[in-house]
Image (spheres, grey):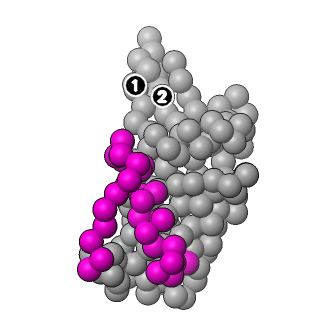
Amino acid sequence: MRRKDREITDFNEIMSVIKKCSVCRIAFFDDTYPYIVPLNYGAESEGQRITLYFHCANAGKKLDLLRRNKNVAFEVDCPGIFIDGEKACDSSMGFESVCGNGSMETVGDSEKLHALALLMRQYSSKQQFDFDENEVKAVTVLKLTVNDIAGKRLSK
């Protein structure tokens, strides 16, 4: 990272950024150009290992691309505030972001409810959730095991 003064190196701070953001952009390999899609997500860590979960339909482009190549890149960022400088080039935008890559796979039925509960906890203050069995069957859950990660922040 070029700007070491903005780098977030503490694992707990990286997880804090991941927990406070609301959208994760995933870049899949496609034929000519990357395919990037914004998704809601849930996150958990065990030790220094981060796992992100997503849900999608049981068929579609994401799953087609994933079958061809399980390697993806991801990015989350939290809204920043404009930092107004005296001159235009002195202005900036505050931000917190986390970027990385890893391998993505679909989860089996035994892991599905756990992953969906993590997704709900990302946005809800509740800890327990009731899931409709038919609706759970109607979604595919994706699991991203993070290999590399980097955090960056600029604050006022």
Query: What residue do we see at 46% from left, 57% from top?
Result: 118
Query: What residue do we see at 34% from left, 57% from top?
Result: 129
Along the line of sight, the residue nearer the viewer: 13 or 66? 13
Q: Position of residue 9 (x, y in %)?
A: 72, 38
Q: Position of residue 152 (x, y in %)?
A: 61, 38
Q: Position of residue 29 (x, y in %)?
A: 53, 77
Res 143 visible: yes
Which numbered disc covers residue 94? 2
Q: Position of residue 146 (x, y in %)?
A: 64, 62
Q: Are marks 1 and 2 in contact (CB under 8 Å)?
A: yes
Work out which residue is located at the far top of the displayed protein and give it.
Answer: 86
Which image quadrant is residue 63 in?
A: bottom left
Which image quadrant is residue 10 in?
A: top right
Q: Is residue 16 left or right of residue 133?
A: right
Amino acid on which the number 1 mark rests in the picture: Phe
Q: Which residue is mark 1?
A: 82
Looking at the image, residue 112 lies above or below residue 108: above
Query: What residue do we see at 42% from left, 31% from top?
Result: 80
Q: Is residue 89 left or right of residue 59?
A: right
Query: What residue do we see at 40% from left, 25% from top?
Result: 82
Mark 1 to mark 2 CA distance (whole Å): 6 Å
